[in-house]
Image (tube, rainbow, N blue to C red):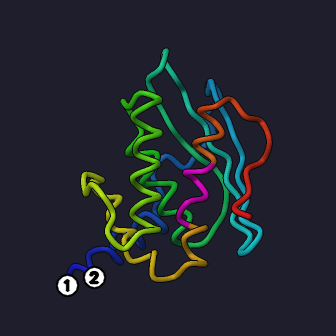
Amino acid sequence: MIDDLYQETILDHSKRPRNHRAMADATRKAEGYNPLCGDKLRLYLKLNGDVVEEASFEGSGCAISTASASLMTESLKGKTRDEALKLLDKFHDLLTTDTPAGRDLGKLVVFCGVREYPARVKCATLAWHTLKSALSGGDATVTTE
């Protein structure tokens, strides 16, 4: 039953992604690319000081990549840069370890099953690696390779 809920959430965010738009007044932008499956992403952030006021993305990708970007942008709003980076670390931990620390990921926990499919981990983390680049002010395209 819980697997159905997780699958339903991922499919919902894949078919109807939240914050899927360009942001003209973004203060930070970064691009990401997953050459393994062709996922492409442009992330927009609007920072007010050190706080993420808005987050959005454009691009195309598989269901997991799109859902991850959608849920990530929802989760970032109101977080400081440091809080966003800690969330990235927790999310990465969720996808790559058998006993992930901290379950305070909210809806992001729906991706816990992805760790069983190592090739799909790159799909789920593309937006997050792009976020790290955007927060650091990087302008190179981030790849999952």
Q: Is residue 135 magenta?
A: no
Give the image location of residue 138, x and y in percent: 72, 34
Three-letter amino acid code at the position of disc 2: Asp
Q: Is residue 127 magenta?
A: yes
Q: Which residues are magenta?
A: 124-129
The residue beneath circle 2 is 4
The residue that appears at 77% across and 68% down in the rendered structure is 35
Q: Nearer the viewer, residue 140 or 8?
A: 140
Q: Residue furthest top?
A: 49
Q: Nearer the viewer, residue 99 or 5?
A: 99
Left/right placement of residue 48 relative to residue 4 reads right
The residue that appears at 69% across and 65% down in the rendered structure is 39
The residue beneath circle 1 is 1
108 versus 30 height, above or below:
below
Q: Quadrant of the C terminus?
A: bottom right
The residue that appears at 54% across and 70% down in the rendered structure is 121
The residue that appears at 65% across and 40% down in the rendered structure is 133
